[in-house]
Amino acid sequence: MRATPRSTPLQSGDLGPIGEALESTNLFGSSLAASAEGAIRFVLAFVAIWFVGRFVILPLVERAFDRRGLDEHAQNPLLMLTKFGVAFFAVAVAFGFAGFGNFLVSMAGIAAAGALAIGFAMQDVISNFVAGVFIYTDKPFRIGDWIEWDNGDYAGVVEDISLRVTRVRTFDNELLTVPNSALTDGVLKNPVDADKLRLKFVFGIGYDDDIERATEIIVDEAERHPDIMDDPAPSVRLTELGNSDVGLQSRFWIANPSRADFVRTRGEYVTAVKGRFDDEGIDIPYPVRTLEGGLNLESGDGQSVVQPAE
């Protein structure tokens, strides 16, 4: 039974034009010229394929994504995978063109030996990569969305989404670089995912004030504001009876929400309601605390003197 011949690096008898030219300079021996020729052929093949991929394949892929209308956050990881594929293909072809044998077979041994070590060393990286894939497929947010996470401790506008991290610009103009797993392992709030957003605000009025009149004012000011929607209509519910006030919760909707719209609209609306309350004598009371007990005093002879609290 004949053994299957294996591909081996270039030998002195297998020199091509490059190797023969190097050997003719008398600066390289046969074996050294063969090795140098293999390296040069590898570099030439890799550079040629990489340039074709970079300036032909990638622009074609980008145009295909644009025609499909993919969002920017979806294009970025796909383009990164395309670049990786081009580089991998370039290395594989250059490996064979240089006479080094089958690239995939050669890589199998290296991959098997390093897989375990790389797996342990890159647990966090792999976790963030998988989370980035989930963000791409599930689309919980997009570039330009206002998001909140960690129970509202962090919030901002998404500037960039990659396979490992997401970059968020806070409302104080600070840039947060957030591992993707931090955005997929917990609860994430995206207030601007839909085309409208409901806002709520509790107005506290005194127990002696007219609840029906206060309700009319709250609804009327919501209907007057140009950025508050008429449909769904604003509403008011009595939600709490506090120690010093009655809580009337106003519920109203805004269209095409953003962080700026949310803060501005709510501020203008609350200011208008407060002005109407002042004009019509409806009080927003301060919390009242009642102290009970007694005051224990001692006279000069050590006798206790108790003064009741009024």
Image (cartoon, rainbow, N blue to C red):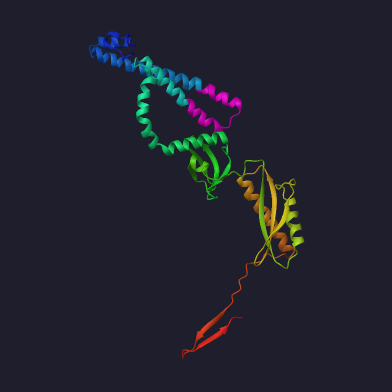
Q: Residue at x 35, y 24 (%)?
A: 109
Seen in the image, is 80 located left or right of residue 244? left
Seen in the image, is 142 located left or right of residue 281? left
Residue 3, image x, y percentages: 32, 11
Vertical relation: 253 (above or below) 27: below
Residue 82, image x, y percentages: 49, 25
Q: Residue at x 46, y 24 (%)?
A: 85
Which quadrant would residue 23 be assigned to in this image?
Answer: top left
Residue 279, image x, y percentages: 73, 63
Residue 77, image x, y percentages: 51, 31
Which quadrant would residue 28 be assigned to in this image?
Answer: top left
Q: Residue at x 64, y 46 (%)?
A: 261
Does the magenta portion include 61?
Answer: yes
Does the magenta portion include 54?
Answer: no
Which quadrant would residue 95 be assigned to in this image?
Answer: top left
The extreme bottom residue here reads 301
Seen in the image, is 9 located left or right of residue 188? left
Nearest to the observer: residue 42 or residue 180: 180
The secondary structure making up most of the magenta span is: helix
Residues in magenta, as a range: 58-82
| Total numbered labels | 0
Vertical relation: 12 (above or below) 189: above
Seen in the image, is 161 located left or right of residue 20? right
Q: Quadrant of the N terminus?
A: top left
Vertical relation: 208 (above or below) 7: below
Q: Quadrant of the C terminus?
A: bottom right
